[in-house]
């Protein structure tokens, strides 16, 4: 896979890195990454993945840009308010790097469409804030054997984890908590979204290029108020309804229907 003169100059700082270099940049260019939720985590992650030269980004979100989003969702500007996030995001990412193919899916990922929405992707970045979507994404990733980078934040703290098979995200969160907190309910400092989104993008880049050690099976928790971070290992749940069943069970859990299989 050859690079144009523009790409060689654009990715020069990657090309001189021993851990990426030409081969790693070629892997980035050949990769397709799905970003679920173009919000506080997904927006900065998308910007950095596009800047890094990921060949194709699939944006999945059914929401529109709101004025309150601009405090942390840096892919958007005031002129985007009222526009579908995937459309505004596509324009922003193309302006940043025209070498990246943008695939926009203006719909909500759910158990009945997760399989075909994520079809053909090499890595999935989940930045959503509801557990139904997180669970459907996780099940589809386990079924397709695609690594999942999960990012979440609230108030002053955030977390990033990588799940590739077993343990999976459902080993970490077995059931949706009854009092699940969202940024709309509890608030969030805007700059924290940039920290967590950037870390999610970094994990995706490491997975694609093989650089370093990804957070596979581990969870990095960042405390923005204290300026500290800790990493915890995620144990595989022997009773996990997704990864303990293997790929076939995960496919059933993901809701792979005739529609998904025929897409």
Image (cartoon, rainbow, N blue to C red):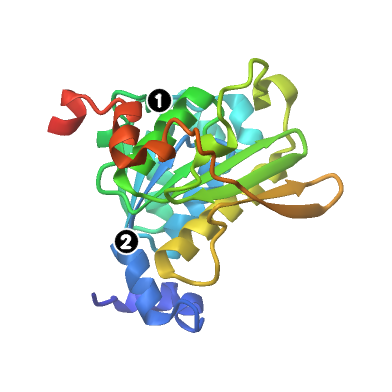
Task: Give the CA distance from mark 2 to mark 1.
Answer: 25 Å
For the residue labelled by badge 1, is the local secondary structure a helix, a strand or a loop?
A: loop
Front-most of residues 149 and 243:
243
Q: Quadrant of the N terminus?
A: bottom left
Residue with the most extreme front position: 238
Residue 114 in picture, x, y percent from top left: 32, 31
- Residue 119 to residue 205: above or below: above
Q: SS class of the residue under badge 2?
A: loop
The quadrant holding residue 106 is top left
* Pointers 2 and 1 in contact (C-beta within 8 Å): no
Q: Is 208 displayed left or right of 152 in the figure?
A: left
- First in sequence, mark 2 or 1: give its number: 1
- Tell me which residue sits at (66%, 37%) in the image: 153
Is residue 228 something one can see in this rendering? yes
**Along the viewing direction, whichever of 98 and 245 lies nearer the viewer:** 245
- Where is mark 1, residue-wise? 62
Left or right position of 260 against 103: left
Image vertical order of residue 18 relative to residue 44, above or below: below
Residue 131 % position (x, y): 53, 26
Residue 81 drawn at (x, y percent) = 51, 27
Which of discs 2 and 1 lies nearer the camera? The answer is: 1
The residue sitting at 44% across, 80% down in the picture is: 15
Q: Which residue is mark 2?
A: 99
Residue furthest left in the image = 262
Query: Where does the image place residue 200, in percent across and percent down from the top left?
Result: 55, 51
On-image quarter of the C terminus: top left
């Amino acid at each position: 896979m050859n690079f144009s003169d523009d790409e060689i100059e654009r990715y020069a700082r990657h090309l001189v890195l021993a851990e990426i270099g030409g081969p790693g940049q070629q892997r980035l260019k050949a990769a397709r990454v799905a970003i679920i939720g173009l919000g506080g985590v997904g927006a900065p992650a998308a910007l950095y993945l596009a800047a890094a030269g990921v060949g194709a980004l699939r944006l999945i979100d059914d929401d529109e840009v709101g004025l309150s989003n601009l405090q942390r969702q840096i892919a958007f500007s005031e002129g985007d308010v009222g526009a579908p996030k995937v459309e505004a995001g596509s324009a922003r990412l193309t302006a940043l790097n025209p070498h990246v193919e943008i695939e926009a899916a203006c719909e909500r990922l759910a158990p009945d469409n997760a399989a075909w929405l994520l079809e053909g992707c090499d890595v999935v970045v989940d930045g959503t804030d509801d557990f139904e979507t997180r669970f459907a994404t996780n099940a589809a990733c386990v079924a397709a054997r695609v690594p999942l980078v999960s990012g979440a934040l609230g108030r002053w703290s955030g977390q990033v984890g990588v799940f590739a098979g077993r343990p999976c995200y459902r080993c970490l969160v077995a059931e949706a908590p009854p009092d699940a907190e969202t940024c709309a309910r509890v608030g969030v400092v805007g700059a924290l979204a940039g920290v967590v989104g950037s870390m999610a993008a970094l994990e995706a880049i490491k997975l694609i290029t093989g650089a370093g050690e990804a957070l596979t099976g581990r969870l990095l928790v960042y405390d923005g108020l204290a300026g500290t971070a800790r990493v915890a290992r995620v144990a595989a749940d022997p009773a996990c309804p997704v990864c303990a069943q293997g790929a076939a069970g995960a496919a059933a859990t993901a809701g792979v229907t005739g529609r998904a299989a025929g897409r």
